[in-house]
């Protein structure tokens, strides 16, 4: 009785082929004849071994670097604009919102309410829209137009812990926002003064 060797796995055949001193057509033909089930893999592997390594240790030439830079600039220009570009009120978070709240003498929740759009644009006094314009660095008509728009994608940027998804918030007047925030009567009169 003769002992038969179990068939080799693909990895073992490729390892044996790689360890050959020469990887010419004769060696490849011998391996393909011995392991016909791996013929395609052996041919691909022999091509891979025959391909010289082309690792360039040098940096890019000036021409190559300028092409890379030009492609990167084109890529950056083609990408979608951030939400803060589309909605200037989105910039009222962080230090900008905090500084504006201090300047106006209101709680930060008032600034947050303006940022999230539930305030009716027509109810906000002109001096306040002027202050928003200065704080955001955009023209006053852009601030008013941004306030008049419904919030875009608010549910995607915030997380909520509730049984259902958040519904749309009804718009309210600026004076009501001040009242809900606990702003004193004197400060409300000062902020609501139109002139």
Image: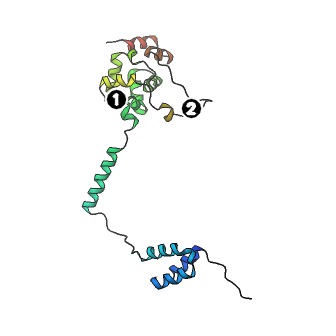
Residue under numbered circle 1: 136
| Pick the front one: 66 or 8 | 8
Residue 37 sits above or below residue 102 on the image:
below
- Residue 67 seen in render: yes
Q: Residue 27: horizontal and vertical position, in percent?
A: 49, 84
Q: Is 5 situated left or right of 18 in this image?
A: right
Which quadrant holds residue 63?
A: bottom left
Q: Residue 88: horizontal and vertical position, in percent?
A: 37, 30
Residue located 43% across and 33% down the image: 94
Q: Residue 104: horizontal and vertical position, in percent?
A: 39, 21
| Pick the front one: 67 or 37 | 37
Residue 27 sits above or below residue 130 on the image:
below
**Could you say whether the residue bearing mark 2 is in a helix, strand or loop?**
loop
- View extreme (left): residue: 63
Residue located 34% across and 46% down the image: 76
| Pick the front one: 13 or 172 | 13
* Crowding near the residue tagged with mark 2, few <14, some 14–19, many ≥20 C-alpha atoms within 10 Å: few
- View extreme (right): residue: 1
Q: Are marks 2 and 1 in contact (CB under 8 Å)?
A: no
- Residue 21 seen in render: no
* Crowding near the residue tagged with mark 1, few <14, some 14–19, many ≥20 C-alpha atoms within 10 Å: some
Residue 1 sits above or below residue 112 on the image:
below
Q: Is 95 situated left or right of 12 in this image?
A: left
Q: Is 31 situated left or right of 78 in this image?
A: right
Residue located 31% across and 52% down the image: 71
Residue located 60% across and 29% down the image: 164
Residue under numbered circle 2: 160
Q: Is 76 situated left or right of 36 in this image?
A: left
């Amino acid at each position: 009785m003769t002992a038969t060797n179990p068939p080799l796995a693909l990895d073992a055949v490729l390892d044996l082929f790689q360890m050959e001193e020469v990887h010419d057509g004769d060696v490849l033909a011998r391996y393909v004849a011995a392991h016909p089930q791996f013929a395609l893999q052996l041919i691909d592997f022999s091509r891979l071994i025959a391909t010289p390594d082309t690792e360039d240790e040098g940096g890019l030439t000036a021409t190559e670097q300028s092409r890379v830079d030009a492609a990167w600039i084109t890529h950056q220009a083609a990408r979608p604009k951030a939400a803060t570009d589309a909605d200037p009120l989105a910039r009222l978070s962080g230090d900008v919102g905090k500084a504006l709240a201090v300047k106006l003498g209101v709680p930060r929740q008032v600034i947050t309410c303006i940022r999230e759009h539930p305030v009716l644009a027509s109810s906000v006094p002109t001096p306040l829209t002027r202050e928003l314009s200065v704080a955001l660095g955009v023209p006053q008509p852009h601030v008013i137009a941004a306030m008049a728009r419904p919030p875009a994608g608010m549910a995607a940027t915030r997380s909520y812990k509730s049984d259902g998804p958040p519904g749309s918030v009804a718009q309210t007047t600026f004076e009501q926002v001040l009242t809900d925030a606990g702003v004193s009567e004197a400060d409300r009169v000062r902020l609501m003064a139109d002139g």
